[in-house]
Image (spheres, helix red, strand yellow):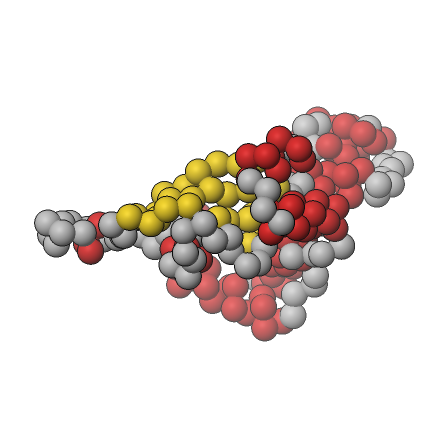
Amino acid sequence: MAPAPADLDALAAHANATSKAPELLAALKAVFGADTAAYRRLYLQPIIESAKLRAFYTHSPTLHAKERTAIEAAYRKAAGGESFPRIAKETGLSVKPFTVRKPVAALPGKAGSLPSGPDPLRPIVEKLSPGQMNPSIVENDSDYRLIRLTTLHGGIYQGEILSLPKLPFDAWYAGEIAQVPVSVTDRTLAHSVTRLYGQVPWVKRTL
């Protein structure tokens, strides 16, 4: 998860060019003064590591093996002809309807309107016929989904989604942190840490 020097360079340049609060960024840098190495190590590096860790967690087949196995079993049931509501009742998965419409600007009489944002379901449902299920399981950062189109009328796609959530990152991370032994032997430091960071889970557990 450790960032390469090029990663730190890119984030530093991005922060300098796009910061929405340049005065706060300048004040932060002032804390480090001329010690740019500390600024990169203590401020920029954790940002990159956090993003990499989240990406690792999100796309890890091992960490989500239980959920993947469950959604694959649901897929086999659906491919065998079972309805989404029946599968949801049998397995505890969630089912909900969806509607995907044409962008506002594409509708008759709406030429002067602002176009709506892209719907992430549109590229999927445009390839389906009514009654057809998407031929593969759809995975995003938060869950696994089975998608079936039920009707198509006047450019309006309607269907249903059978979904199974992944364990949220924060819950997984808290469990990992709980396994890391921490001890503070300096009494003065322990008192200071408890007073300033008493709400942090490892502080509560250790001190």
From the viewer's perspective, tell me whether residue 31 is left or right of residue 202. Answer: left
Quadrant of the rendered image containing residue 55: bottom right
141 or 132, which is in the foreground? 132
Q: Which residue is farthest front?
A: 81
User: Residue 178: x and y, percent?
Assistant: 80, 38
Residue drawn at 77 percent across, 28 percent down: 204
174 or 8, which is in the foreground? 174
Quadrant of the rendered image containing residue 196: top right
Question: Is residue 46 visible to the viewer in this orientation of the structure?
Answer: no
13 or 80, which is in the foreground? 80
Residue drawn at 46 percent across, 64 percent down: 14
Q: Is residue 195 above or below residue 21?
A: above
User: Residue 3: x and y, percent?
Assistant: 65, 65
User: Residue 184: x and y, percent?
Assistant: 85, 37
Question: Is residue 83 visible to the viewer in this orientation of the structure?
Answer: yes
Q: Quadrant of the N terminus?
A: bottom right
Quadrant of the rendered image containing residue 56: bottom right
Q: How many marks?
A: 0
From the viewer's perspective, tell me whether residue 4 is left or right of residue 134. Answer: right
Q: Is residue 189 above or below residue 13?
A: above
User: Residue 123: x and y, percent?
Assistant: 41, 60
Q: Is residue 68 above or below residue 198?
A: below
207 or 90, which is in the foreground? 90
Residue drawn at 58 percent across, 46 percent down: 81
Q: Quadrant of the C terminus?
A: top right
Residue drawn at 44 percent across, 38 percent down: 97
